[in-house]
Image (cartoon, rainbow, N blue to C red):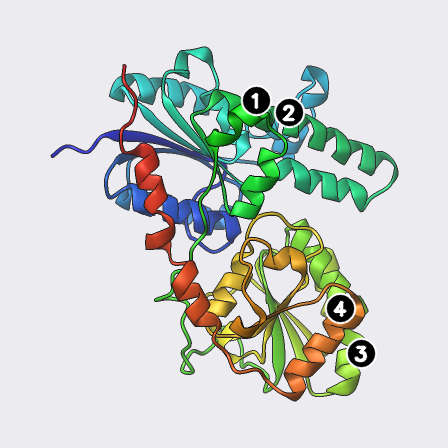
Amino acid sequence: MTKPDLLFLVHRIPYPPNKGDKIRSFNLLKHLSKNYNIHLGCFVDDPFDLQYIEKLNRWCQSCHVIKQNKWLAKLVGLTGFITNKPITLPYYYSASMQAWVNKVQQQHDIDNVLVYSSSMAQYVEQPKYSALNRIIDFVDIDSDKWRQYARKNTGIKRWFYQREATLLQRYEQDICHAFTKSLFVSEDEAKAFRQLMPKAAEHKIQSLLNGVDTDFFKPDSQLTAVEATLPEQFIVFTGAMDYWANIDAVLWFTKQVWPKLKAQYPKLQFIIVGGNPSAEIKNVAKNQSIIVTGRVVDVRPYIQHALFAVAPMLIARGIQNKVLEAMSMNKAVICSTMAMEGINAPTDAGAKVADTAEDFFNACLAELEQPSIQSSRQWILNHFTWPNTLKKLDELFAHGVNK
């Protein structure tokens, strides 16, 4: 039986699944490819990922991949001030991408479209596409992250971020009205967005949980790090270290919590694992008790051999994959309320929530003094496996549209 065609638009190449948004988009791609011929349009914003373009052929019928120059994209994004649009839209606009979308939809008479992130909705928002089954995966409320950035800044930066938050929220609302369904990474996130929409649109807003590859992220004492010999005692933070929310979390922890923790346990080390560390994060490594790894081949050894993981997120939306992965490896996690949002694991599942510097220090200290007995992996197996979470996706695309 011939598989129907599906257009999948993603703002960042969904492979390899080595960071938050790519983990989700890759698993959506892999899952949908079982029942659909996927036509994928995406950008590559990291030269390291260019080597993986051909690998997409395993899951895709056709691909249109555009290499994105971040600095040029930022300049183009500023045209949003002229057009009164959020800068996110021109940042991710390409005439080549639009031409490809128009062509592939016409050639294959595509009914079903999955858009990943609000920035890619612009390619199928035109009236001529209104009859299609357009589903957008917002993942999280991106506009609210800009609003959080605004609160943490002053002067021109605050104005800039607040402007983006306001315009992007308006665009998110317009897309929700126009599209068939709007998906979010957790019910908490979906509920928050419903509050921004009129009651008549609430039925369009649904949650689609993230999952974890529990066969990959599982306890394995034999795991070793390729890059270095791991210290005897350390705690770990994982995540892309050019992402502001991760940078903010690590800087807060190293300033507010780490000195007191180190004073209590002089041999303890803190390892920050993630690609493209910013200058601020590299500077943190001047402290001999803190290690910044940069990009690693495999994050699992660092999680496996850590005493526990930390996720002190102060800016966050959606679900934190770093928390899910650590829990899947049956590792204790000490995190902020924001980092636990959408996961909502109970304390006895191995996740401790703390928000103030004092509470975070005390939670870390308690875990060091008396390591907790873990059942976090079982919580993940019960609630966050990809096969279970993606069943809803099949239902959303099952019937397509009537022409």
In the picture of the structure, the residue carrying the numbered disc 2 is 170
SS label for mark 1: helix
Give the camera-side residue of 218 and 278: 218
* Nearest to viewer (mark 3 / mark 4): 3
In the picture of the structure, the residue carrying the numbered disc 3 is 260
Position of 110 compared to 98: left or right? Answer: left
Cα distance between the residues tagged 1 and 3: 48 Å
Q: With respect to residue 272, does 144 lie above or below? A: above
Cα distance between the residues tagged 4 and 1: 41 Å
Q: Residue furthest front?
A: 199
In the picture of the structure, the residue carrying the numbered disc 1 is 174
Instruction: Give the mark, 3 or 4, whose residue is nearer the N terminus.
Output: 4
Q: Residue at x 52, y 80 (%)?
A: 305
Give the camera-side residue of 20 and 287: 20
In the picture of the structure, the residue carrying the numbered disc 4 is 254
SS label for mark 2: helix
